[in-house]
């Protein structure tokens, strides 16, 4: 019994050492802000004190790092799912393949109406029927990101890439999920791989630049800008300017801009002034604030349609917690 207890204590210390080693690796990765680095250093000190160990105790090291162990576990989980096809041979029947496609379509429909939890359920059922289809994992990654489950999105993308290493969208969505987790250097590598596979994808080009910029910002916060957005960098980016050019050539956008330039959407006067009731009754006059709001909403919708992933990246930079990943363009 004593021997068993000692073994458990030794394993606990080795696990704690692996965690401390992982935290040290994160400190040296260059992906963290100074505040995050300070928090990690405190966490490391607390763990070393609690378990009576330090990062210098190399005799506690195991053959694989914590990251490698996690990657192996993820790969095993993907493999396990792929082996759960209902046929003894491991290959789903034609009926199961058809049903999986129907479930995937149902999931896509739920994504369009922003019912992301239902979408996850449909994609999961599709995966259970045909766990060898990379698209199902990639689509579920998009839904998980929309729900803020970026870790789940990363795991789904890993499964998709494991099934189809040439699937560019899986790399792109992996980059988006990693960027939402503030793992910008890793996001950069996945965006670069996505671009290798799909060199003409403007979204990947823009998102890559944003991730590279954020990676630089972890070392020092640049002066100026809007909410941390590098406007100068975006304006010099061909992908972003191409999107802006396409927007300005859109007749609906031109109409919106023309209306705003002509004063059709000027601000409403003070609510106590005699002009306020008249403006409200006019419904669309020079003082119609709702018209300005509507114009802004329409313009935002146009941008969202042009490049949803870019819009989500901008939201990520302008909020303390990124809302969700973009990319409703399911297969």
Image (spheres, rainbow, N blue to C red):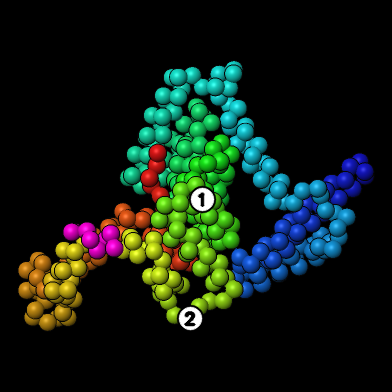
Q: Which residues are magenta?
A: 245-252
- Compare marks 2 and 1 and give the one earlier in the sequence: 1
Residue 223's mark?
Answer: 2
Which residue sits at x=44%, y=80%? Answer: 224
Could you tell me which quadrant the N terminus lies in? top right
Which residue sits at x=84%, y=46%? Answer: 8
Q: Position of residue 80 (x, y in %)?
A: 62, 32
Do we see residue 283 in this rendering? yes
Residue 41's mark?
Answer: none
**Secondary structure character of the magenta stretch overall:** helix
- Against 266, residue 90 (above or below) is above
Q: Is residue 78 left or right of residue 207?
A: right
Q: 242 and 170: which one is in front?
A: 242
Of circles 2 and 1, the one toward us is 1
Q: How many circles with numbers are drawn on the protein?
A: 2
Do we see residue 144 in this rendering? no
Q: Is residue 248 part of the magenta span, yes or no?
A: yes
- Against 159, residue 295 (above or below) is below
Q: Is residue 85 part of the magenta span, yes or no?
A: no
Could you tell me which quadrant the C terminus lies in? top left
Which residue sits at x=8%, y=79%? Answer: 275
Find the distance from the CA under tag 2 to the CA under tag 1. 33 Å
Mark 1 surroundings: few (<14), some (14-19) or many (≥20) residues within 10 A: few
Residue farthest to the right? 2
Q: Is residue 280 left or right of residue 30?
A: left
- Against 285, residue 187 (above or below) is above
Residue 266 in which image quadrant: bottom left
Which residue sits at x=49%, y=19%? Answer: 93
Q: Position of residue 38 (x, y in %)?
A: 66, 72
Mark 2 surroundings: few (<14), some (14-19) or many (≥20) residues within 10 A: few
Q: Position of residue 320 (x, y in %)?
A: 48, 67
Q: Which residue is mark 1?
A: 196
């Amino acid at each position: 019994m004593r021997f068993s207890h000692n073994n458990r204590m030794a394993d606990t210390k080795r696990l704690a050492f692996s965690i401390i080693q992982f935290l040290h690796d994160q400190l040296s990765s260059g992906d963290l802000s100074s505040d995050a680095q300070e928090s990690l250093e405190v966490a490391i000190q607390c763990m070393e004190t609690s378990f009576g160990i330090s990062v210098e105790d190399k005799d506690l090291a195991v053959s694989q790092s914590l990251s490698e162990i996690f990657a192996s576990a993820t790969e095993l989980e993907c493999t396990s799912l792929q082996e759960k096809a209902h046929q003894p041979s491991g290959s789903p029947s034609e009926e199961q393949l058809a049903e999986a496609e129907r479930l995937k379509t149902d999931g896509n429909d739920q994504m369009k109406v922003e019912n992301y939890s239902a979408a996850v359920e449909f994609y999961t059922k599709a995966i259970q029927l045909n766990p060898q289809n990379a698209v199902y994992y990639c689509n579920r990654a998009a839904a998980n990101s929309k729900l803020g489950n970026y870790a789940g999105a990363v795991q789904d993308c890993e499964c998709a890439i494991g099934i189809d290493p040439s699937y560019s969208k899986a790399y792109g969505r992996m980059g988006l999920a990693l960027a939402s987790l503030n793992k910008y250097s890793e996001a950069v590598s996945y965006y670069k791989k996505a671009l290798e596979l799909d060199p003409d994808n403007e979204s990947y080009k823009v998102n890559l630049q944003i991730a590279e910029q954020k990676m630089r910002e972890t070392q020092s916060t640049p002066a100026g800008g809007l909410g941390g957005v590098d406007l100068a960098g975006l304006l010099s980016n061909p992908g972003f300017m191409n999107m802006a050019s396409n927007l300005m050539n859109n007749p609906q956008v031109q109409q919106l801009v023309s209306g705003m330039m002509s004063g059709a959407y000027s601000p409403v006067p003070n609510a106590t002034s005699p002009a306020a009731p008249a403006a409200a009754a006019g419904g669309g006059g020079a003082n119609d604030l709702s018209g300005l709001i509507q114009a802004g909403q329409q313009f935002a919708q146009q941008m969202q349609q042009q490049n949803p992933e870019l819009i989500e990246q901008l939201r990520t930079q302008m909020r303390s917690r990124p809302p969700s990943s973009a990319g409703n363009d399911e297969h």
